Image (cartoon, rainbow, N blue to C red):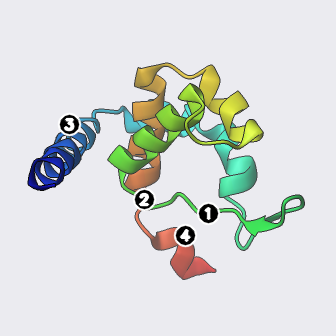
Amino acid sequence: MRSRIVAIILACAAVTVTLAARADGDIAKGKVESQTCLGCHGIPDYTNVYPTYRVPRLAGQSAAYIVHALQEYKDGDRSFQTMHAQASSLTEQQMENIAAYFQSLGKKQDKDH
């Protein structure tokens, strides 16, 4: 049992280090590459029709988290067909660019709405 807990802690640490290292995007390129993202993630209080849920705002989100999420959609580890379709064509660098752009926005968009 103890070795399993140690293994889980080490795995979590490895993921944290990997995520922290993945925030080397170009903000200017990310602004251009994120235009399709804004159709859903840039609308205040936007709710998807089916299944009904609130679409998350990405402004100010951690770049490392966005890259990780996009990679999981691309790999099929997260199941939402629209996001899989969007992420499947992105390169690692494009993911990092998009993530850097959204992180650079801070939370200012949420303050406006």
Quadrant in which the N terminus appears: bottom left
**Spatial separation of the CA atoms under disc 3 and disc 2:** 16 Å
| Residue positioned most to the front | 1
The residue at the point 42 percent across, 39 percent down is 67
Give the CA separation, mark 3 to mark 1.
Answer: 24 Å
Q: Residues within 10 Å of mark 2 (few under 14, many from 20)?
A: some
Q: Residue shown at 61%/63% (left/top)?
A: 56
Q: Amino acid at mark 4?
A: Gln
What is the quadrant of the C terminus in the image?
A: bottom right
Q: Amino acid at mark 1?
A: Pro
- Given residues 100 and 66, the one toward you in this image is 66
Mark 3 = which residue? 21
For the point 55% across and 36% down, which residue is it?
77
Residue occupying the point 28% across, 33% down: 24
Give the structural element (helix, strand or loop) at label 3: loop
Viewer-nearest of labels 4 and 2? 2
**Given the image, on which type of amino acid does mark 3 rest?**
Ala
The residue that label 4 is drawn on is 109
* SS at mark 1 in the image: loop
Q: Residues within 10 Å of mark 1 (few under 14, many from 20)?
A: some
The quarter holding residue 60 reads bottom left
Badge 1 is on which residue? 56
User: Mark 3 packing: few (<14 Cα in 10 Å), some, or many (20+)?
Assistant: few
Query: Which residue has dot 2 on it?
Result: 61
Contact between marks 2 and 1 (CB within 8 A): the answer is yes
